[in-house]
Amino acid sequence: EVIEPAIYAVRTADRDSAVADRFAWLWVTGLAYEAMRLNEAGNYSAAKELIDWNYSRVRKFVEGFSNARELLATLAQTQKRVSRRWKGRSKQEAYIATK
């Protein structure tokens, strides 16, 4: 569904910010989890593409959030790590954090 800019502005102004923030974190951690699974399977390009495809959508959704920078930085950092072989403690900690 294509949403007209004026309607989008009304919808985003009326949304419950706590619910929207929680949804954004769930979205980002869900993407990170799936990208890590692809990385684990050795499918680095698909892991990177998953983040690429969703980044602009997440950016639009979190526009105006007080923690938008943190959410987008988390997504960007995940993309950087999953686009190549990733092993070690940082991957293990990230994996646990997404559950």
Image: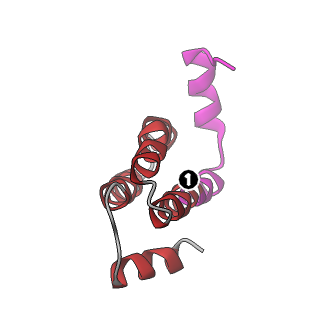
Q: Is residue 7 above or below residue 22?
A: above
Q: Is residue 5 magenta?
A: yes
Span of residues in magenta? 1-26
Report the residue at 43% width, 42% height from top.
Answer: 49
Q: The disc labelled 1 sits on which kind of residue?
A: Ala
Residue 15: image quadrant is top right
| Nearer to us in this view, 91 or 13 | 91
Image spot of residue 8 (x, y percent): 59, 25
Image spot of residue 37 (x, y percent): 53, 64
Report the residue at 56% width, 26% height from top.
Answer: 9
| The C terminus sits in image quarter | bottom right
Report the residue at 34% width, 69% height from top.
Answer: 86
Instruction: Tell whether 70 sits left or right of 22.
Output: left
| Nearer to us in this view, 56 or 13 | 56
| Nearer to us in this view, 66 or 24 | 24
**In the current view of this chain or complex, which residue is farthest to the front?**
42
Q: Is residue 37 above or below residue 11?
A: below
Look at mark 1 in the image and give the residue it sits on. 24
**In the current view of this chain or complex, which residue is farthest to the right?**
1
Report the residue at 38% width, 51% height from top.
Answer: 72
What secondary structure is the magenta-colored segment mainly? helix
Q: Is residue 75 magenta?
A: no
